[in-house]
Image (cartoon, rainbow, N blue to C red):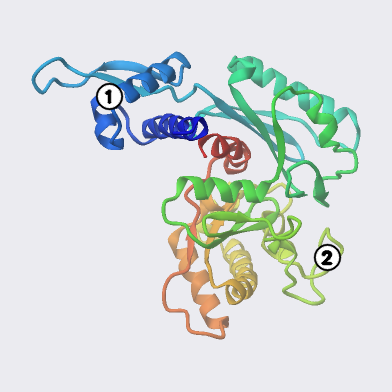
Amino acid sequence: MKNEEYLDIKQANYRNIYQLFFQHEHLSKPQIVKMLNLSLPTVVNNITELETEGKIKEQGFFQPQGGRPAIAYQLVDDAFITIGVEIQQTKVRCIALNLKGEVLNVETSVLYFENEPPYIENLSQVIYLFLQKIAYPQERILGIGFSIQGIVSKDGQSMLYSRVLSSEHFDFKQLQLYFDIPTMLFHDVKCAALTELWFSEHIDNAVYVSISEHLGGAIIINNQIDLGKKGYSGALEHLQIHTDGNLCYCGQRGCLETYCSLSALLAPDETTEAFFASLRENDDLSVMRWDAFLEHLAKGLNTVYLLLERDIILGGEIAFYLIEDDIKILQKRIRELSTFPLDSDFIRIATQQKYPSAIGAALPFLIKYLA
């Protein structure tokens, strides 16, 4: 056997044994021998290596079946961690994930996005303080992902477009200089869609629609977030549903954003919680506003469904407040607009409703590590 082939087999055995620990709570050496059809010496050598590297650890014994009890090993799920940073107009959220994608720590800080270079320094300081608090050595941090309200280049190194955040002085390359850890920039809605994809078992192809302060979309194709040619894919917020409608921040009129974002739904100083509390109590004005909201949303999503014929996942801040009756009404209105018969249900509420953009910003480094 050639030396290169031997090394390939050795690396494959190591990787396969390590990945088993992500699928099982506890494993013994004999179990691994049986599962992977490997020799006991091969398994022993790899277990020793993984234990020395701090990736697995002993965790008691299995119940004996005659003879000596086998040692139980388990994954050290924070042997490495990833960091997600969600940048919003008025705040920054930092989150740390372990190797299973579980949240270890989260902190939200008030930081107003400003069209000034000092913002980068202030942002880096917020992140440094978070890293000091969680106290993981730098070599155990796989990377820092940044979620931002703007279209991002496919290589994750620059912002291409944002009218929500004034981005002229958001110099990501300058921000990278503050860290000796891999960093990447991501579109916030695509981050949220990735979080839904990571934690859901039955997504293949779908359209993720995020409705928060602003509206956005992401397209999931073959269990991957589609980025399009340059990164503009899924920008449903600028789908025009009325030719001479409301003025959008993009400069066009009648964009879905201007009718179906929380900014469009809520009155000044009204909270999402307060609106939905009134709605569920059948307040006449709230019911009327919600009816108009669903009417516009149905118009936009009908176009989306006609183009892609994919199930639609409603996420963002609104997902926490939606109930199944809302979905039934929305589907009914889309069916009334649709050119073709729509018999089965095709809209659902996102399952991941807490910190989806921050989590999604951290996940790409974890996915790369586990590949």
Residue 111: x %, y % from top left: 77, 31
Numbered disc 2: secondary structure: loop
Q: Is residue 238 above or below residue 344?
A: above
The residue identified by callout 2 is 247
> Is tag 2's residue or tag 1's residue first in the polypeptide sequence?
1
Residue 249: x %, y % from top left: 83, 58
Q: Amino acid at mark 1?
A: Leu
Q: Residues within 10 Å of mark 2 (few under 14, many from 20)?
A: few
Residue 350: x %, y % from top left: 50, 53
Is residue 28 visible in this depiction of the protein? no
Residue 81's quadrant in the figure?
A: top right
Residue 121's quadrant in the figure?
A: top right
Residue 286's quadrant in the figure?
A: bottom right
Is residue 315 visible in this depiction of the protein? yes
Q: Residue furthest front?
A: 1
The residue identified by callout 1 is 40
In contact (CB < 8 Å): disc 2 and disc 1: no
Please indicate whether residue 48 sits to the left or right of residue 238 in the image.
left
Residue 292: x %, y % from top left: 63, 70
Using the image as rendered, state which of residue 367 and residue 236 is in the foreground: 367
Using the image as rendered, state which of residue 259 and residue 283 is in the foreground: 259
Please indicate whether residue 154 sits to the left or right of residue 206 in the image.
right
Please indicate whether residue 323 sits to the left or right of residue 164 in the image.
left
Q: Which mark is residue 269?
A: none
- At 51% from the left and 50% from the top, the residue drawn is 197
- At 63% from the left and 65% from the top, the residue drawn is 289
Q: Amino acid at mark 2?
A: Leu
Numbered disc 1: secondary structure: helix
* Quarter of the picture holding the N terminus: top left
